[in-house]
Amino acid sequence: MSPLVLLVTDRQRFEKACRREFRKVGLNLRTIKADELSGYLVENSVVFFDAASEMFDEDELLSCVGFAKALRAVVSVALPDDAAMTDIQELLDDLCPGLVARGQYEMGRIANKLARHYEHRLSNRFEYVTVSPRPKELLVILGDGTAVLVPRPLDQADDETDVLSISLSEESSTATLALASGKKITLDVRSIADSRSQKAFAAYANGIEKYEAQYGAILAARLKSLRQAAGLTQAELARRTGIHRPNIARVEAGRHTPSLETLTRLAAAIGVTPTSLFLDE
């Protein structure tokens, strides 16, 4: 089945721009209106909301995003190009981490992140399971094309007798092995994915956390220093940028990493280049 993203918009130009970017990464779109969402949305759907659509005000957008998240959907939001909906942007960032864009210029980034989500989902589905040419082993091919050798015994119930047959569940998330001893054992794809990725993910997450901590600390110190050097209070900077003062305070405290668009607005209001927020120029 082709990867499908539900696009909630009433703007034809936005829809065309989405289709162009999403097609590049192999994603298909189904365009719907907000009042059609409940009819199309199922558990684990992927949804992209165009917040600049006339159908949305802040309350309606939060209601739709919250409903989708309650169904464990992957949710992305494109906010308007201007400073509209700034009041709820922080909440949206918390609901949809890394998947909130400001305007169309970040469309490619969102498309790529959603495509990577589908790649991850495929890795959690069996494509093929058989007995390995080597003894005491199974050969598993996952939906993303990854081949994995799984040693036996699979669990305490596996007596390591010959495998007579292997059947996959309807959603291909489990494989049931019928053994010569008469026993049946079940292999869950999540156990394989967890085993493959646990160490790699731990190292990756640790690296990301260290990077973000360093990144946030540098940005926090530079923003505060440059703001004070320009003789601006947080309140004045908020007035110039349209960014709420508490959000600026969170950045200066190192508790929030803003988007590129937000950094650009902050730098322009202070009178420096965006790179000055990280490096001495």
Image (cartoon, rainbow, N blue to C red):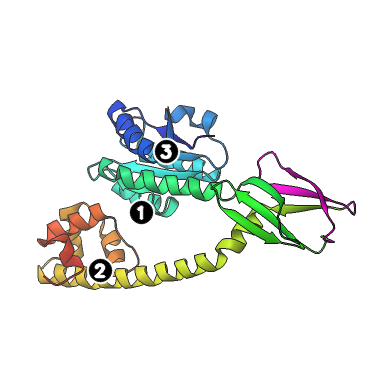
Residue on which the image places disc 3: 26
Of mark 1 and mark 3, the one earlier in the sequence is 3
Is residue 243 in view from this perspective?
no
Which image quarter holds the C terminus?
bottom left
| CA distance separating discs 3 and 2 | 35 Å
Q: Is residue 210 left or right of residue 219?
A: right
* Image side of residue 13 versus residue 201, left or right: left
Q: How far apart are the two marked residues, 1 and 2, measured between alpha carbons?
A: 18 Å
Could you tell me the amino acid type at mark 2?
Leu
Task: Say which residue label 1 marks.
Answer: 90
Q: Earlier in the sequence, mark 3 or mark 2?
A: 3
Q: Find residue 219 and name its label.
A: 2
Looking at the rendered structure, the secondary structure element under dot 3 is loop
Q: Residue at x 58, y 62 (%)?
A: 196
Report the Cα–Cα distance between label 1 and label 3.
Answer: 30 Å
> For the residue marked with disc 3, what is the amino acid?
Gly
Categorize mark 2 by other alpha carbons within 10 Å: few (<14), some (14-19), many (20+).
many
Q: Amino acid at mark 1?
A: Glu
Give yes or no for residue 264 being in the magenta stretch.
Answer: no
Disc 1 or 2, which lies upstream in sequence?
A: 1
Q: Where does residue 103 sit, x and y in percent of width and height?
A: 27, 42
Q: Quadrant of the N terminus?
A: top right
Location of residue 270 in the rendering, given as x and y in whole percent from the top left corner: 12, 62
Q: Which is in the foreground here, disc 3 or disc 2?
A: 3
| Residue stretch rendered in magenta on the structure | 159-182
> Is 276 in front, or is 133?
133
